[in-house]
Image (cartoon, helix red, strand yellow):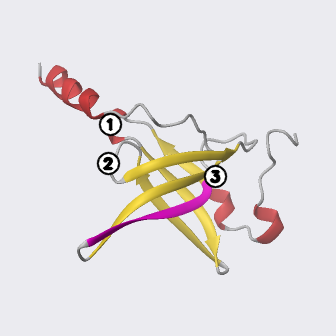
Amino acid sequence: MNNAILSTIENAQLRNDIPSFRVGDTVRVHYKIVEGDKERVQVFQGVVIKRHRAGARSSFTVRKVSGNVGVERVFLEHSPRVEKIESLSRGVVRRARLFFLRELSGKAARLKDERDK
């Protein structure tokens, strides 16, 4: 009984404007940030290293290198703060989690593109 109620509430919160993307893809996430009384959109572009699929609680982790420092950020997929997700390129990977990219740097941290195979 409780599961039916929870699932109807969660299904009402799901978004349908999210493009399909996988682990290894390069994405650009437009995220709303509140600074004081102002609200602006910040863009975070990087490689998806992890996805957690759980209905309305789905999340994904994006990693980028900014100033020789690796930066990872976890986004809730169906959050109203996520304004837009753009999929830029598809990466060819054979794993579900790309945590090995944390130890790599420079050219070694690149992934093959789907069209380059």
Left of 52 or right of it: where is 2?
Answer: left
State yes or no: residue 44 in magenta: yes
> How far from the left and from the top, in percent, is residue 88?
67, 47
Residue bearing the label numbered 1: 56
Q: Secondary structure at mark 3?
A: loop
Q: Residue at (68%, 61%) from the top-left corner?
A: 101
Q: Say if 75 sits above or below 51 in the image.
A: below
Label 1 vs label 2: CA separation? 11 Å
Q: Secondary structure at mark 1?
A: helix
Left of 103 or right of it: where is 84?
Answer: left
Left of 56 or right of it: where is 29?
Answer: right
Q: Say if 62 sits above or below 92 in the image.
A: below
Quick one: label 3 or label 2, which is nearer the N terminus?
Answer: 2
Q: Is residue 24 visible?
A: no
Q: Secondary structure at mark 2?
A: loop
Q: Say if 68 sits above or below 28 in the image.
A: below
Question: Which circle, 3 or 2, is nearer the viewer?
Answer: 2
Residue bearing the label numbered 3: 98
> How far from the left and from the top, in percent, is residue 78?
36, 42
Residue bearing the label numbered 2: 80
The region drawn magenta spans 38-47
